Image: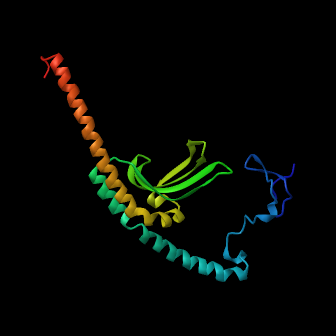
Amino acid sequence: MNTLEPDFPWPVGTWMEGLGQHLIFPWPVWALEVRMTSKERVPESFSPFLEELSAASEVLNVASDELGKPIPALNDFLKNLNLGIATWVKFEGGEDDLANTYWQNSIGYSRVKGKWGIVISKEIGNLADPDHGDYEAWHFHEAPRSLRIKAIDKLPELLATLVQETQQTITKIKAKSERTNELTKALQAINPKKK
């Protein structure tokens, strides 16, 4: 058995011993440069790109924060309304008839990790069994940036849909209340002592 040595490369499938564990690498380890931790090890030709990338990442993070700025205030407003009505609007998706699969990304107002708020979901599944697809949801600020950028345009539509869903829920509750009131009156007629 070969043991962990300080120099690269190790051949494919080399067994190494380290920290009491045996590891096998199924890929060419020489493709990895694990010890590259300082700028001195980066080739000079990469430096301009790394500097540009560093500057661009700062601008990207500021722009991303600006994009989601209204979300906390909107979450607080909706929380105070105590609606408790989950609502979703799809912002992209599709189907593959040959593979019999579908995918969709949505923005919604729902409970994720025990907390209500504006959320983004990603779903992939089989058209023959849509109830058992792969589903993932995040609060807006925790969602992948690429999804946040696409989802934000659907925020007005989400709010309009939330209004519709709330009005429909009110209508349903009123209809159910009338039925429960009729039941209460019928029970009181049978047993007049309990009013």
Residue pictured at 18% horizontal, 16% vertical: 190
User: In this rendering, would 176 be left or right of 60?
Assistant: left
**Residue at position x 58%, y 53% from top?**
103
Q: Viewed as shown, does residue 29 lie left or right of 81? A: right
Q: How is the image coloured?
A: rainbow
x 54%, y 65%: residue: 146
Residue 6 can be seen, yes or no: no
Furthest residue in direction front, as rendered: 97
State which quarter of the image contains the C terminus.
top left
Q: State the image coordinates of residue 187 (x, y, percent, origin top left).
A: 20, 21
Q: Is residue 60 above or below residue 26?
A: below
Q: Is residue 84 above or below residue 151?
A: above
Q: Residue 144, how many percent across, how many down?
A: 53, 61
The percent position of residue 30, horizontal first and vertical second, equals 81, 64
Q: Residue at x 15, y 19 (%)?
A: 189
Q: Nearer the viewer, residue 82 or 170?
A: 170
Q: Is residue 140 above or below residue 57?
A: above
Counting from the top left corner in percent of width and height, residue 159 is at 35, 59
Q: Quadrant of residue 185?
A: top left
Front residue (pair 32, 143):
143
Up-down: is 45 above or below 75?
below
Work out whether residue 100 can be spotted. Answer: yes
Q: Nearer the viewer, residue 34 or 13?
A: 13
Q: Which quarter of the picture shows residue 141?
A: bottom left
